[in-house]
Amino acid sequence: MQVTITPVAPDQVAMLSAIAQQTFYDTFNGTCTEADMQQFLDTVFGEAALAQELANPNDHCFFALLDGQPAGYIRFMEDYSSFPLMQQWKALELKRIYLSKEYQGKGIAQQLMDFYQAYAQANGYKALWLGVWEHNLRAQKFYEKYGFANSGHTHDFPIGSTPQTDFWFWKFI
């Protein structure tokens, strides 16, 4: 399945918010209270927060489009604030990669990962890294297929008052 990967434009923030909220909910529903989930969705994936991200020229967000409609999206940037150890290399953090449920398992995530890695190589990055929830084994296996490994480092990723832990995965290129 061939997709078009295109930058998310500022006037597409409502579309980004809709797919970001739905894909996150579909992925993590049942891992926290409904109130915590709704507060997280409104705060992190609301239009105001996403518009701020899109306004940052160092923050890269792209849709995976099928027939002009978003099947998913990817977001990445050079940002060491949450894992300062990565500062010793020129590193590119994969912040988000999500697909709508109906498009999972169809090769679209692979195209987005290929795009992310090609961007990193073209721009001289030496390391790639990402956070993945400790219980999301499907995602961990996906990243491992791309050569990522668990770094042995973790970070807290609470959803509201529900504590959660992410593993930092990394790959050197």
Image (cartoon, grey):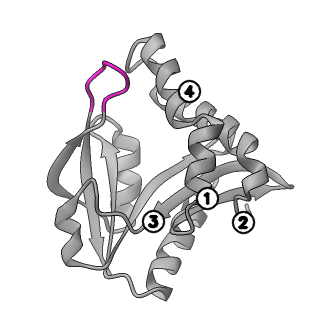
Q: Which residues are magenta?
A: 158-164
Sequence-wise first label, 1 or 3:
1
Queried whether the magenta region covers residue 163, the answer comes back as: yes
| Label 2 vs 4, first from the N-terminus | 2
**Can I make out residue 29 in this image?**
no
Decide: is 20 above or below 121.
Answer: above
Dot 2 falls on a residue whose secondary structure is strand
Q: Which residue is mark 3?
A: 77
Q: Nearer the viewer, mark 2 or mark 4?
A: 4
Q: Mark 1 — residue?
A: 55
Look at discs 1 and 2 and give the one toward the viewer: 1
Q: Amino acid at mark 4?
A: Asp
Q: Which residue is at a point 37% across and 82% down the rendered structure image?
A: 125
Residue at image position (70%, 58%) is 8
Q: 141 or 20, which lies in front?
A: 20
Residue 6, numbered circle: 2
User: Distance between the Cα atoms at labels 2 and 3?
Assistant: 16 Å
Task: Tell me whether the residue at label 2 lies in contact with that at label 3, contact meaning CB atoms closer than 8 angstroms.
Answer: no
Q: CA distance from mark 2 to mark 4?
A: 25 Å
Amino acid type for the residue under numbered disc 2? Thr
Residue 2's label in the rendered image is none
Q: Residue flagged by tag 1: what amino acid is it?
A: Ala
Q: Is residue 10 above or below residue 2?
A: above
**Mark positioned earlier in the residue sequence (1 or 4):** 4
Identity of the residue furthest to the right in this view: 67
In the figure, is residue 75 to the left or right of 91? Answer: right
Which residue is at the front of the view, 19 or 26? 19
